Amino acid sequence: MKLCALFSGGKDSTYAMYLARKAGHAIDCLLTIQSSYVESYMYHLPNIHLTKLQAEAMQLPQFMVNSAEGKEEELRPLREALEKIKKERGIEGITTGALASVYQKTRIEKICQELGLKCISPLWGKNEISYWHELLENRFKVMIVAVAAHGLDEKWLGRIMDKAAVAELEKIPGIHPAGEGGELETLVLDCPLFHQKLVILESEKKWDKNKGELRITKAEPGKK
């Protein structure tokens, strides 16, 4: 099928694209929702501006729209954007990085059903630790850019995930190791979909009590 990828720049949306393409689907374009709603249950917030560089690295056109605030209100721009993209580019479905959030998955599926689009969520139900190992085995370079859980301190910000980091995550009690509960947010710096990697030049850590974010202020494409 000809698909539009819901894309946030993190591991889940990127790996969902990778699996969809591996299954024979064509990724036609990207849709990124830029939200200022800090309590959003739907959208990834940290470093969303870097998706432009990632889109260029994948040589794919990107649609970026702003989201409204509120649980139901933030769905409206998503629906309107998908309706427009379907009309303009003839997409047949979308990919999502939904892994375990029924809240996200059911709302996106409802919108797709209304618009006559297929919703492909290839990560759904994956074991979170096995999933991390899949990412590493498939040469995904993933950086932690936000944390919000006990056991995840400031040292995790900017950390590149490897087998040792996955083992540490597995030992932290009470969290979803893949971050489905908002415990962590990620940024993909390189993967097989990228023709160029993402090089971070300048960043700053913001820490408040038991949560923090790595704000990337300067980045550029680099040779693989």
Image (spheres, rainbow, N blue to C red):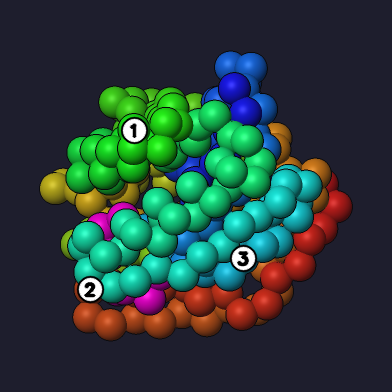
Among the two numbered marks 1 and 2 on one chain, the one whose residue lies closer to the N terminus: 1
Observer-side mark, 1 or 2, equals: 1
Question: The disc labelled 2 sits on which kind of residue?
Answer: Asn
Marker disc for residue 85? none
Q: Which residue is mark 2?
A: 210
Q: Residue at x 48, y 47 (%)?
A: 83
Secondary element at image label 3: helix
Question: The disc labelled 1 sits on which kind of residue?
Answer: Gln
Q: Is residue 35 left or right of residue 125?
A: right
Dominant secondary structure of the residues highlighted in magenta in the image: loop
Residue 54: image quadrant is bottom right
* x and y percentages locating residue 162 in the rendered image: 51, 42
Marker disc for residue 113? 1
Q: Give 70 or 202, whichever is nearer the viewer.
A: 70
Q: Is residue 146 left or right of residue 25?
A: left
In the displayed image of the protein, which residue is found farthest to the top?
23
Secondary element at image label 2: loop
Q: Which residue is mark 3?
A: 50
Question: The disc labelled 3 sits on which kind of residue?
Answer: Leu
